[in-house]
Amino acid sequence: MHRTFRAGFFARVALAAVFSLVGFSFVSAKDGMTSSLLIGNARIDIMVEGGTLRVPAEDVLGWVKSAAESVAAYYGRFPLPRVSIRITPFEGRGVRNAMTFGDRGGRITIRVGNSTNAAELASDWTLTHEMVHLAFPSVDDDHHWVEEGIATYVEPIARIQAGHLKVEQMWLELVRDMPQGLPQVGDRGLDHTHTWGRTYWGGALFCLLADVEIRRRTNNAKGLEQALRGILDDGGDIRREWSLEDALRAGDRAVGVNVLQPLYTKMKDKPVSVDLDSLWTQLGVQSDGASVHFDDNATLAAIRRAITTAPESNATADDSLPPGSIAVFAGRAVGPS
Ligand SMILES: [Zn+2]
């Protein structure tokens, strides 16, 4: 588990047309159930270990598919050609103890409570977070913040792009949670301050600042999304061990402006505070803690809209529109491996 529990009081966007394209097949065996899902050219092998999940197998597979669709929407494809997901039931409810590994071609382990219901799976963010980890190389432990920061920042954007989260919910939670990423007394920069807040939300703050700056410098033509796609397309996935400098250089090269490298130089060894209230105002995000309103006349309103808009779809004034091209990512069920 990587983040505070996300309250699920928002309405999910239904994509019935996409779901209807997908079939499921779970095969029961003595030691559990196995299934596979194809998403584009990628294959996801799912293993539910022995134990009883009360939620139907179709809902478990639908949960995996939603997370995979989200990550594929953000990166333009699923990050690895093949990945295995091992689901271990526990007594209780919820999703916890998720971990992602670069060995054996890439794999995720995750625990699901045996009383978890379909709605809880449908609003889960954890598996999407783990799948984002697949799309960035393994870097030294001092830079754990960049791995967690990217996963924390990208996960809700990816789910919005796939129609699984409302854009208002993301900004509500960013305004609420991002202050946890600000440096506290005694902070020595992102590479030397390994607290929970600086690792997850300090890393996410780095991503938000980079996203806004790339968009500002490219006249909103490119953003962090294109930088991260560039790193992945250069072979930087979780199966590889890279230096952080090489990864950031690949990201900057992909967008044609030097943003990631100088931002890292600025933030790695010393505390850099950020006026978040001013940033939210410039982006046109007004939150009262219970709901958000958007100011489309704000200086950076167009950048705010672009952050959550899938590159393939046309930007519109309506942040809540799901992308129209998600059907290309829909998979189909295949037999057990
Ligand atoms: Zn994580």
Image: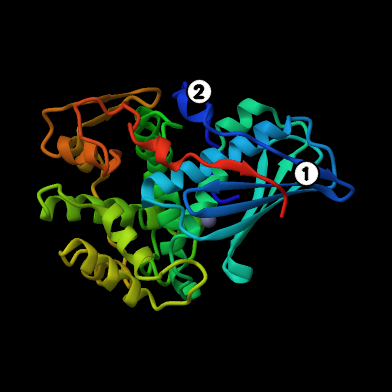
Residue 177 in sight in this render: no
Q: Position of residue 258 (x, y in %)?
A: 17, 67
User: Which residue is more in the foreground, 195 or 253?
Assistant: 253
Residue 198, quarter of picture: bottom left
Residue 294 in sight in this render: yes
Q: Position of residue 259 (x, y in %)?
A: 20, 64
Q: Please say which color scheme the image uses.
A: rainbow
Mark 2 and mark 1: Cα distance apart in space: 25 Å
Name the outermost residue toward the right. Answer: 30
* Residue at the disc numbered 2: 9
User: Which residue is more in the foreground, 290 or 183?
Assistant: 290
Name the outermost residue toward the front. Answer: 335
Q: Is mark 2 within 8 Å of ligand 1?
A: no
Residue at figure coordinates x 11%, y 28% from the top left: 297
Q: Secondary structure at mark 2?
A: loop
Q: Residues within 10 Å of mark 1 (few under 14, many from 20)?
A: many
Give the residue type that dot 1 points to: Pro
* Residue at the disc numbered 1: 89
Q: Position of residue 13 (x, y in %)?
A: 44, 24
